[in-house]
Image (cartoon, rainbow, N blue to C red):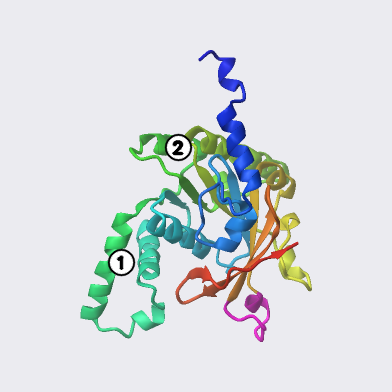
Amino acid sequence: MTEVEKYRITKDEIDKVIRGMCDKNQINGMKSGFPGIDELTGGFCKGDLIVVGGRPSMGKTAFGLSLVYNMAICENASILYVTLEMTKEKIIHRLLMMCVGMDILDAQEIDRTAMKKVLELAEADLLRGNIFICDNLDITVTSLDQLIGSLEKKPEIIIIDYLQLMAFGLNILSKDQYDSYLDITMQGLKKIGRKYECAIIALSQLSRKPDKRKNHIPLISDFHGAGIFLARADTILLLYRDEYYEHDSEYPGVAEVIVAKTRYLCGTVPLKFSRNKAGFENLSHYYMVL
């Protein structure tokens, strides 16, 4: 095939798009394990950059690890989890508790013998999944590229926890420097996704704007460098828990995943959130289209 010919549209490519357009139930990307999110986004597609934004304590890491559990352990997808906040040991501990399906407080009340048996079953689940965890605090886009290239089995999903630490570390930057570093990092991540045909999921901090508003529900404009996020991200998800702001909330234990940008439908997906289990679970197969 010549250099020119490989760019020509083929019948197989057209037929694939037509099937996706005609089948309303078609999920073109990898399933997240949360049907409401998959129906709105069409799944996590190869080469896409998905950003998950939230204020502190909204559950960004818990959401990321819930995706690891759903996709690697339940769907057998290959996942690389890059953590710039927690150690590999702590990530494994949280994944074990998800496999056990047990409240952390309940686990403390079980005798050691019984707990060991339960954890051995969870260990088998973790080892069966294709999970790689990198806790190198100095990792950059360039070294991430090199790491993926060295892996015998290339990951289908890469989760970054979290984006700002990869882009800037703990450095204090001016706004112009921030925007420049952020844009370069997001472009680099998109190139990695295309190069290795994997989806990149980047967890991201939001500014304090939601805390200062009467309505605390996050918006895309709450990102530092919101224009860059809009331009570079293929999908943007925002996490919100009403009970964090309202102690007498009507929705205790419920988190909202707001699909704020996607090629398909925008809307809000309610999920169950347990602080003690440190994870997200499906509440119901329901979403609201905005």
The residue singled out by tag 2 in the image is 143
Name the kind of residue labelled 2 in the image: Ser
Q: Secondary structure at mark 2?
A: helix
Q: What stretch of residues is rendered in magenta?
A: 242-253
Q: Residue at x 38, y 53 (%)?
A: 76
Mark drawn on residue 122:
1
- Residue 97: image x %, image y %? 37, 70
- Front residue (pair 283, 47): 283
User: Badge 1: few (under 14), some or many (20 or more) residues near its Cα, within 10 Å?
Assistant: some
Mark drawn on residue 289:
none
Q: Is residue 47 above or below residue 96?
A: above
- Residue 145: image x %, image y %? 46, 36
Q: Residue furthest right?
A: 214
- Residue 141: image x %, image y %? 51, 39
Q: CA distance from mark 1 to mark 2?
A: 31 Å
In the rendered image, the quadrant that contains the C terminus is: bottom right
Q: Secondary structure at mark 1?
A: helix
- Front residue (pair 58, 19): 19
- Any part of residue 237 in sight: yes
